[in-house]
Amino acid sequence: MSAASGVKVAPAILRRRGRRRWPGVLGFGATALATLVSLGALVSILAYLIIHGIGAFNWNFLTKEPAAVGEAGGGIAPSLMGTAILVTLATIIGAPLGVGVGIYLSEIAGDTRFARFSRLAINTFIGVPSIVTGIVIDHLKSSFFELSPV
């Protein structure tokens, strides 16, 4: 509080506020500097890729198969098709399942053991990045089926 509001503040409290303020300002400054350095690196990499790679980006790049190792040219058509198939299958399987579980948990389940387990699993998967989940599942799949992870 200030003297304008009619409440007097002890000098010791004002000194503590001053001591607390500078670490906060320094921390904010360090974070802002790290952000600017990271953004600068990102922009420079993006600029390099655009300047040196714009000539290779054409319709053939999107529609042709990859060239053999050491040959110039080639495309990413199989990768794009694989991605489209994977996203389509995941949507076909995941969307109805997610909507169904959501409706079941909110309207029907109540406080059953399955509902508590489902809510725990959902909350756990919400908090874990998908790349971590994928790596763990790939490791378990490789261990269980004795397959190489690639």
Image (tube, rainbow, N blue to C red):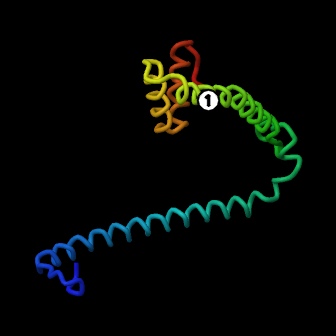
Figure quadrant of residue 28 = bottom left
Mark 1 residue type? Gly
Residue 80 coordinates in the image, percent (x, y) = 78, 38
Residue at 74% in and 35% down = 83
Residue at 58% in and 61% down = 42
Q: Secondary structure at mark 1?
A: helix
The correct choice, above or below, for 21 with respect to 90 in the image is: below
Residue 119 coordinates in the image, percent (x, y) = 47, 28
Specify the quadrant that holds the N terminus.
bottom left
The correct choice, above or below, for 117 with respect to 31 in the image is: above
Q: Left or right? Give the position of 53 relative to 136.
A: right
Q: Nearer the viewer, residue 12 or 129?
A: 12
The correct choice, above or below, for 116 with respect to 126 in the image is: above
Q: Left or right? Give the position of 76 relative to 47.
A: right
Specify the quadrant that holds the C terminus.
top right
Does residue 115 appear in this view? Answer: yes
Figure quadrant of residue 64 = top right
Residue 75 coordinates in the image, percent (x, y) = 82, 42
Q: Nearer the viewer, residue 16 or 67?
A: 16
Does residue 67 appear in this view? Answer: no
Residue 98 coordinates in the image, percent (x, y) = 61, 29
Residue at 54% in and 23% down = 108
Question: Which residue in the protein does label 1 denote?
Answer: 98
- Number of numbered labels in the structure image: 1
Q: Nearer the viewer, residue 143 or 109?
A: 109
Question: Badge 1 local density, few (<14 within 10 Å), some, or many (20+)?
Answer: few
Residue closest to the far top:
145
Figure quadrant of residue 90 = top right
Residue at 67% in and 31% down = 95
